[in-house]
Image: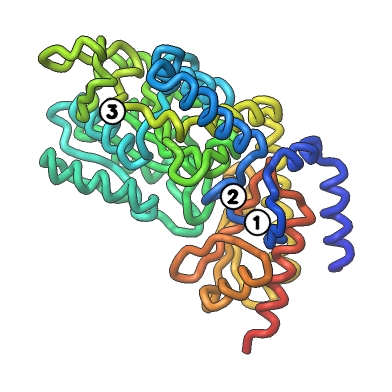
Amino acid sequence: MTDDLLKRAEALDAADPLAHLRERFLTPDGFDVVSYLDGNSLGRPLQATAQLLDSFVREQWAGRLIRGWTDGWMEWPLQLGDRLGAVALGAAAGQVVVADSTTVLLYKLSRAAVDARPGRRKIVLDTDNFPTDRYVLEGIAAERGLSLTWIETDPATGIRPEQVAEVVDEDTALVLFSHVAYRSGWLADTAEINRIAHAAGALTLWDLSHSVGSVDVHLDEWGADLAVGCTYKYLNGGPGAPAFAYLRRELQGELRQPIQGWMGHRASFEMGPGHEPAEGARALLSGTPPILAMVPLHANLDLLAEAGIEAVRAKSVLLTGYVLDLADEWLAPLGVEVVSPRDAARRGGHVTLRRPGFEQLLESLWDNGVIPDYRRPDGIRVGPAPLSTSFAEVHRGLSVLRALLEKQP
């Protein structure tokens, strides 16, 4: 069976229409990684990214100095936002900006949303969402005198529409969930949850951090109100790369974000008294845009546009399906449990494996050139990035994990 699984990996790689794109990623001399399975935490850099950064420093920053702002830097948050919206988010122009961190943008949008629903006292969220999402809403609830309605979600699955329908009512201002659950990879029924929330008059906010660049997203079509996400996972933006925010066009005159900075003013350089928000999504900006940190996104959005998000999602489904096959054949007999959806329609871009004692294996895995992601108390997330990961690489990584498990007492 082992030979069959390897042959299947080789066949899948041979048939992969995106295989040639793996050569675009930067592999340094002496690279000691044989299987990188943590693309859902930090993506690999492109060769083009290194070239763009060097060119930016030498030509734009050094060569143009302060003139770079009038050369175009000032418009990067919206230009990159529009590009990201078109390539990966299913969002028409004028609704996405690139700026800040995911945490800061979550706060901006959440505060704006609850303030836009005065008199409503409830925020609905789930118990297993990413900590930042929960912490931000806890702070806003305390700040604004609101109550939190917690939906208990199974860490092996995720939020379901029927759970939302049970608690959303005319007192709900905002519901916030992740499109893909960070722990299990559960893919939420976003359109149906939006419908349920809107029927009650509530606004919806989606965290796309674990889906953008791996799962096809259709914010306009789904009727989403607000969304945020990071760019350093499947979008390969680099450590601490700026996040993005989506604000549906129909809400742009209604919602007012709370961190009023000069860059979100209607006329930034007038420096006048009082804050007058800019029109459209630009009003979400606060301070000076992180221009240097945005440079990698130019290369990565070019690559994603070339590949096409539909092809990326198709490969992601095959990659995670192959992980499930290896887990069932090799790891289940060694006490490993799959805690991610089997149904591809409900599975995002990663698979979580659970077994007591996984933490003790992390150093050995790294020593053997295998890098997955670990989540306490006992979960390993296998996150193959479709643009940079081969099926053979997944085979190599899980074969090392199997061998280490076999040596455990």
Q: Nearer the viewer, mark 3 or mark 2?
A: 3
- Name the residue: 62% across, 89% down: 409
Whether label 3 touches label 2, CB < 8 Å: no
Q: Nearer the viewer, residue 192 or 47?
A: 47
Q: Residues within 10 Å of mark 2 (few under 14, many from 20)?
A: many
Q: Nearer the viewer, residue 390 or 138?
A: 390
**Which residue carries the number 2 mark?**
39
> Of the numbered discs in the image, which one, if any, rests on residue 215?
none
Q: CA distance from mark 3 to mark 1?
A: 35 Å
> Of the numbered discs in the image, which one, if any, rests on residue 36?
1
Tag 2: amino acid: Gly
Answer yes or no: is residue 220 visible: no
Tell me: residue 399, above or below residue 321. below
Tell me: residue 80, above or below residue 167. above
Q: Tell me which numbered mark, 3 or 1, is placed earlier along the sequence.
A: 1
Q: CA distance from mark 2 to mark 1?
A: 7 Å
Q: Nearer the viewer, residue 316 or 344?
A: 316
Asked which quadrant contains residue 203, the reply is top left
Q: Nearer the viewer, residue 312 or 363?
A: 363
Q: CA distance from mark 3 to mark 2?
A: 30 Å
Task: Tell me residue 227's x, y (percent).
Answer: 40, 31
**Which residue carries the number 3 mark?**
287
Tell me: residue 51, above or below residue 316. above
Tag 1: amino acid: Tyr
Q: Nearer the viewer, mark 3 or mark 1?
A: 3
